[in-house]
């Protein structure tokens, strides 16, 4: 770590940091890389602040002057007491990575629409109940982590995030997804664990790039035929639901290598599961099999980690 001096930092940036130091009652140091647990650390390029870590400082607000850090690309403000962001947050036009996990955020300002360079937005473990429609204008966004909030529904505009690759919404209050979700053609990872889904949304069938789908601990009673279109799906996690059967089409998902179906109400397995050329892991524990499904005998002869 290096000490900040007027010689290695732009004067305007230095003034802003002094204001933050006053709020935190601590001094900044220059570090090589900002991480989630970086406390009072900054990265500097050509005399300008490019990264800022404000971990566990119990901040209740962010100063408006923060937005004048014009070169800021990474902002980590995990584990604070923030209930809101200032509207001015949208002025951070260079911001690419923004982590605000484990705060007390109840809403996001519409001004986030202006964060056009943002690629990674993590805001898990907050108190969000909804997302603003303008979130759909984050055209560069690739990762959106929203787990452990209180979100009941997503805005239709979520379908405009065409660069999105990872979407995590675990432990919320979701029962469905907007139909526009089918427009997320770049999405590779979708995690909806610990919600209130009774069926897998039909709109998921059009997520042509999807490789990993996780819906454990919901209330699923069936697997829709529409999922047959997920030809690139590699990992499927449906543990801890109410599934009593798996349809034959699962044998057509040729990219599947990992399937978790433990803790359901399964009575049997379709023979078609033997047709999966890439299958390496299958978990069937804690189901209602009266007898061992016939296909198990065949699967046991293959190089598969099999649990039942």
Image (cartoon, rainbow, N blue to C red):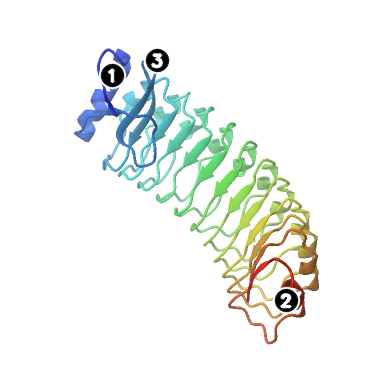
Question: Of helix, strand and loop, which one carries label 1?
Answer: helix
Q: Residues within 10 Å of mark 2 (few under 14, many from 20)?
A: some
Q: Quadrant of residue 49?
A: top left
Residue under pointer 2: 296
Residue 34 in sight: yes
Judged from the image, the secondary structure of the residue bearing numbered disc 3 is loop
Q: Position of residue 118 (x, y in %)?
A: 51, 31
Tell me which residue sits at (65%, 73%) in the image: 243
Residue 65: which disc?
none
Q: Which mark is residue 14?
A: 1
Location of residue 29 in the rendering, given as x and y in whole percent from the top left corner: 27, 28
Left or right: 38 with respect to 204? left
Which is more N-terminal, label 1 or label 3? 1
Left/right placement of residue 214 relative to residue 41 reads: right
Residue at the (53%, 27%) spot, across then down: 117
Q: Quadrant of residue 28?
A: top left
Disc 2 versus disc 3: distance between alpha carbons? 62 Å
Residues at marks 2 and 1, CA–CA distance in whole angstroms:
66 Å
Q: Nearer the viewer, residue 216 or 304?
A: 304
Q: Residue 92 vs residue 177: left or right?
A: left
The residue furthest bottom is 290
Q: Which residue is mark 3?
A: 46
Residue 109, located in which quarter of the rendered image? top left
Q: Nearer the viewer, mark 2 or mark 1?
A: 2
Q: Contact, CB < 8 Å: mark 3 with mark 1?
A: no
User: Which of these two is toward me, 15 or 181?
Assistant: 15
Up/down of 7 relative to 222, above or below: above
Would you say residue 155 is visible in this rendering? Answer: no
Direction from residue 166 to residue 222 in the image, left or right: right
- The C terminus is located in which quarter? bottom right
Q: Which residue lies at the image location 73% right of the left edge and 63% below the top edge?
A: 224
Could you tell which of marks 2 and 3 lies nearer the N-terminus?
Answer: 3
């Amino acid at each position: 770590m290096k000490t900040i001096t007027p010689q290695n930092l732009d004067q305007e940036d230095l003034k802003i940091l002094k204001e933050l130091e006053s709020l935190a009652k601590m001094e900044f140091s220059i570090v090589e890389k900002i991480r989630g647990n970086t406390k009072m650390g900054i990265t500097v390029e050509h005399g300008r602040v490019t990264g800022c870590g404000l971990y566990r400082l119990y901040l209740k607000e962010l100063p408006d002057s923060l937005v004048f850090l014009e070169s800021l690309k990474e902002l980590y403000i995990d584990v604070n007491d923030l209930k809101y962001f200032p509207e001015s947050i949208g002025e951070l036009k260079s911001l690419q990575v923004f982590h605000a996990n484990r705060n007390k955020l109840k809403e996001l300002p519409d001004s986030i629409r202006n964060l056009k360079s943002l690629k990674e937005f993590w805001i898990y473990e907050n108190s969000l109940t909804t997302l603003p429609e303008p979130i759909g204008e984050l055209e560069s966004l690739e990762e959106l982590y929203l787990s452990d909030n209180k979100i009941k529904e997503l805005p239709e505009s979520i379908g405009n995030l065409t660069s999105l690759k990872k979407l995590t919404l675990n432990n919320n209050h979701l029962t469905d997804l907007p139909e526009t979700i089918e427009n997320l053609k770049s999405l590779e990872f979708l995690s909806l664990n610990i919600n209130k889904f009774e069926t897998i949304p039909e709109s998921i069938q059009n997520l042509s790039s999807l490789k990993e789908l996780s819906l454990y601990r919901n209330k699923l009673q069936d697997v829709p035929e529409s999922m047959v279109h997920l030809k690139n799906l590699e990992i499927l996690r449906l543990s801890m639901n109410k599934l009593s059967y798996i349809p034959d089409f699962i044998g057509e998902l040729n990219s599947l290598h990992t399937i978790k179906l433990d803790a359901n109400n399964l009575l049997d397995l379709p023979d078609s599961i033997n047709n999966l050329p890439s299958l390496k892991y299958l978990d069937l524990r804690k189901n209602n099999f009266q007898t061992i499904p016939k296909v198990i005998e065949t699967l046991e002869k293959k190089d598969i980690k099999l649990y039942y």
